[in-house]
Amino acid sequence: MSELDELSAEAEIGDQAKIFMDSELGRTLLGIAEQESETARRALGRVDPDNKKEIVRLQNEIALGERFPQWLNELFEKGNNALEIYRHEKRRLE
């Protein structure tokens, strides 16, 4: 696979991530992730401080809820960057 093909594929994934985030399904899943994270935050405030296993479980839930939208945004940003590089390389080769 050439560098331009890789850039094109990365740009396409970024575009798909943006379409997904803007879709009903994407908004629903992002909302669920946010709700799950918030529920875990509230539970973390009430958990027995000696229950390390539950604390770690809740911290992991919070982290996952925060990472999911970050992953999509990172894909989108990487796609935009790849598209810019792709366009620059295309012009350079022409």
Image (cartoon, rainbow, N blue to C red):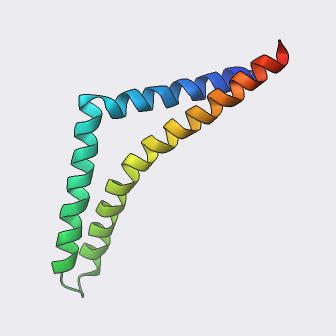
Q: For this view, does 45 lie left or right of residue 56?
A: left
User: Outermost residue, top direction?
Assistant: 94
> Residue 90 lies in what quarter of the image?
top right
Residue under the image location 70 percent in, 22 percent down? 87
Looking at the image, residue 70 lies above or below residue 6: below
Q: For this view, does 90 lie left or right of residue 51?
A: right
Q: Nearer the viewer, residue 84 or 64?
A: 84
Where is the N terminus found, in terms of image quarters?
Answer: top right
Where is the C terminus found, in terms of image quarters?
Answer: top right
- x and y, in percent, of residue 73 in the image: 46, 43
Q: For this view, does 88 lie left or right of residue 36?
A: right
User: Outermost residue, bottom direction?
Assistant: 50
Residue under the image location 78 percent in, 18 percent down? 91
> Residue 41 lies in what quarter of the image?
bottom left
User: Outermost residue, right direction?
Assistant: 93
Looking at the image, residue 1 lies above or below residue 32: above
Residue under the image location 63 percent in, 27 percent down? 83
| Number of callouts | 0
Q: For this view, does 78 lie left or right of residue 56?
A: right
Q: Nearer the viewer, residue 51 or 65?
A: 65
Looking at the image, residue 40 lies above or below residue 17: below
- x and y, in percent, of residue 67 in the image: 40, 53
- x and y, in percent, of residue 51 in the image: 23, 82
